[in-house]
């Protein structure tokens, strides 16, 4: 999903002007977990991150945001509407798109909201398991003004062990509103 050089140049200029830097190696295929997700600025930075690397990330966004004038903007930037009342239909469609060897990057804010919650949504993990795609931990860190790609791993099926990796990575990352960050924990860990 390579993007035109103009977007790449624009993204790099905007990030540089705002004193943000990008780090990490972009994957060609995978499920991207974006955290911390505490502000709408997270979406802007994720978009600029993808553009600066010359890629398009399909970001899951709640369907309600596609109503009105914001809808065309979201679609043009690669956002994918998620009907939270019927997420299975969206997931089935995404799994079909993920088949094959072509570039496929699906971005998910696993916290599910910009407010503090008790658990992360486990969709990123289930989609990665079902599709065979790896999980890449994408991040932003406001104090260091860094946005980028962290480690990539395939889910092992041992949810608590995999989530320990996730917790360790995000332990020192701070969003725009740190008090709104939901610590990485899945409901499935309580059942394990």
Image (cartoon, rainbow, N blue to C red):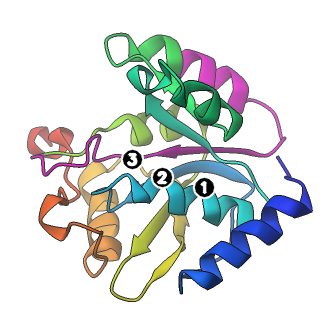
Question: Which residue is denoted by mark 1 in the rendering?
Answer: 47
Residue at the image point whose x is 52% and y is 18% from the top: 90
Placement of 179 over or under 83, stated as above or below: below
Mark 2 element type:
helix
- Nearer to us: label 3 or label 1: 1
Mark 3 element type:
loop
Question: Which residue is denoted by mark 3 in the rendering?
Answer: 109
Alpha-carbon span between mark 2 and mark 3: 9 Å
Residue 138 covered by magenta stretch:
no
Crowd tier of the residue under label 2, counting other residues whose Cα lies within 10 Å: few below 14, some 14–19, many 20 or above: some
**Position of residue 136 measured from the top left corner of the image (x, y, whole percent):** 53, 60
Alpha-carbon span between mark 2 and mark 1: 6 Å
Placement of 59 over or under 88, stated as above or below: below
**Position of residue 60 measured from the top left corner of the image (x, y, whole percent):** 49, 35
Whether residue 103 can be seen here: yes
Answer with the quarter of the image where residue 48 lies. bottom right
First of labels 3, 1 by sequence position: 1
Q: Which of these two is toward me, 160 or 144? A: 144
- Tell me if 58 is positioned left or right of 33 in this view: right
Q: Which of these two is toward me, 10 or 2? A: 10
Q: Can you say which quadrant of the picture contains the C terminus?
A: top left
Q: Are marks 2 and 1 in contact (CB under 8 Å)?
A: yes
> How many discs mark residues in the rendered view?
3
- Nearer to us: label 2 or label 3: 2
Mark 1 element type:
helix
**Position of residue 104 measured from the top left corner of the image (x, y, whole percent):** 72, 42
Label drawn at residue 43 = 2
Residue at the image point whose x is 28% and y is 38% from the top: 121
Crowd tier of the residue under label 1, counting other residues whose Cα lies within 10 Å: few below 14, some 14–19, many 20 or above: many
Residue 99 covered by magenta stretch:
yes
Placement of 184 over or under 30, stated as above or below: below
């Amino acid at each position: 999903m390579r993007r035109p050089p103009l977007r790449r140049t624009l993204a790099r200029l905007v990030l540089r002007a705002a004193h943000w830097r990008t780090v990490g190696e972009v994957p060609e295929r995978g499920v991207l977990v974006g955290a911390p997700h505490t502000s709408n600025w997270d979406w802007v930075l994720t978009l600029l991150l993808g553009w600066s690397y010359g890629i398009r990330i399909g970001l899951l966004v709640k369907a309600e945001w596609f109503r009105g004038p914001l809808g065309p903007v979201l679609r043009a930037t690669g956002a994918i509407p998620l009907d939270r009342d019927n997420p299975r239909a969206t997931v089935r469609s995404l799994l079909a798109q993920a088949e094959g060897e072509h570039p496929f990057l699906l971005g998910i804010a696993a916290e599910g909201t910009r407010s503090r919650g008790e658990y992360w949504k486990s969709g990123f993990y289930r989609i990665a398991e079902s599709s065979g795609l790896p999980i890449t931990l994408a991040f932003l860190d406001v104090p260091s003004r860094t946005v980028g790609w962290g480690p990539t791993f395939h889910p092992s099926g041992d949810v608590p062990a995999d989530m320990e990796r996730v917790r360790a990575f995000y332990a020192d990352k701070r969003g725009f509103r740190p008090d709104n960050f939901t610590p990485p924990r899945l409901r499935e860990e309580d059942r394990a």
